[in-house]
Amino acid sequence: MSDRPFATLSLTARMAAGLVALLLVAGLVLALASFAYGRAAAQDAFDRLLIGAANDIAASVSVIDGAPVVDLPLSAFELLALAPEDRIAYQVRGVDGTILTGHADLPAAPRPARGADDTLFFDADFTAEPARFIRVTRRFAERSLSGTVEIVVGQTLRARRELAYDITRRALVALAGGGVALLALTVLVVRSALRPLDRLAEALAARDPQDLTPIATGAPRELAVMVSAMNGFMDRLERQFGAMRGLISDTAHQLRTPVAALRAQADLAASEPDPERRDRLVARIHRRSVSLGRLLDQMLSRALVVHRLDSARRERLDLRDVTLDIVESGDHQLLAPGVEIRLDIGDEPVMVRADALSLGEAAKNLLGNALLHGRGPVSVGAEIRDDGARLFVQDAGPGPAPELRARLGDRFVHSAAASGQSSGLGLSIARSVAEAYGGHLRMEDRPDGFRISIVLDADPGETP
């Protein structure tokens, strides 16, 4: 639930929020880095002032009558006066350690290591305030004076801190200005990048609800994937709607005449006084009712198959299992009692990738056509041939006439040999299933009868 408010944010808002977070993190890192750099820069700058002042004082020490004398130069204090808010301290000690001039309470400088430089920086407190000090030594080797004079100059850290803060502020101000400009530019770029989405939405909103033709709006490569997916989805919808329209059209086309004939014959039977003629009419009504029921079964089967071709997931299956299920179901005994049904499968798996229910419906329709229009015995089987995996139905009859075979598979093709029975719908179902899985229907005249097969590509995967 906590992620839902963020999930409803626009892409622009998400990009802006991400960029603001990035700028905040970058600002924190830059502030720390800028402050560290500012402190180093300020320390280096003011240390140079201390060095200049200490060297000026050291240069002003002279020897008079065997004693060191300090004539403090004005230039030394002018250098330190460049930081007017800071307090200045200095001290000059003679060769015997006595204080020649300056503050007597300055902290003692640490003893330098042997061989170390004569110039030494150190930090200490001066009147309860942190300060920076420099110790410079000047060596005398004269007849009247021999030894080292030590000069210590110190300065509080106010100007140093102010300079470090000023450098940090300038860096953050520059970052803030650049961040605002970058944020504005990002919003403009994102809006420009998302403009094709707006055009796509406008094109969809302007479409007629019945228009499921592919979207031809030019789109960037990243958006073309979504447009392609939408076109595929609309194509599946169009096929589903086409199947429904076809079912409705077929129902109206095929049922109008049989239902009218049934009603007329029922009216005749109801008003027929001759029992013998009435019995013949009732038998005719029964035959037409059975034929009508078979037609309805085929039409519903076709609607189911067309629906599943787009919605069902393709699985790896053995066509031998499909044929075995058809034979074991026993539905053929209701359609043609007494006709011998043979199962013709071998030991080698016949693997394909398809939907078992759709293939089963297609094979049942082929079997139904063979039982109604062919001659027993009827064989149902599966095999692997050079052109792929086959699920076949074979009967002992001669098969349809050559001129009729070219039209088999079209819906509601009637054959005179079939006594007015419709065979095209069952073959249409089988052909639709075969083509949906990249295959085709194959008809063959064989020495022992007529065979029709659903030919599919064999699955190259490992056999179970």
Image: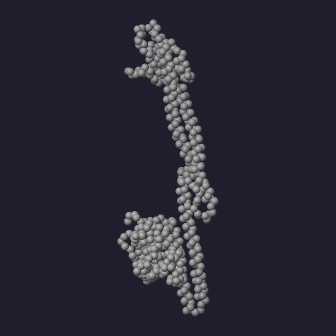
Residue situated in front as seen by the camera: 396 or 343: 396
For this orientation, the residue located farthest to the top is 65
Left or right: 8 as drawn, with respect to 355? right
Q: Nearer the viewer, residue 13 or 460?
A: 460
290 in relation to 436, above or below: below
Residue 56 visible (yes or no): yes
Rendered location of residue 312, percent (x, y): 49, 66
- Give the quarter of the image for residue 268: bottom right
Task: Work out whether 215 lies above or below 134.
Answer: below
Q: Which residue is depicted at the point 54% across and 41% down? A: 23
Q: Residue at x 58, y 56 (%)?
A: 218
Colouring: one colour
Q: Whole-percent x and y of residue 138?
A: 44, 16
Which residue occupies 59% across, 76% down?
252
Residue furthest to the front:
403
Q: Quadrant of residue 79?
A: top right
Task: Quarter of the image for the C terminus: give it.
Answer: bottom left
Q: Residue at x 44, y 8 (%)?
A: 66
Residue 281, image x, y percentages? 56, 88
Q: Nearer the viewer, residue 97 or 412?
A: 412
Relative to 336, is 246 above or below?
above
Count of numbered tags:
0
Residue 106 place in picture, x, y as percent: 48, 19
Whether residue 298 is visible, yes or no, is: no
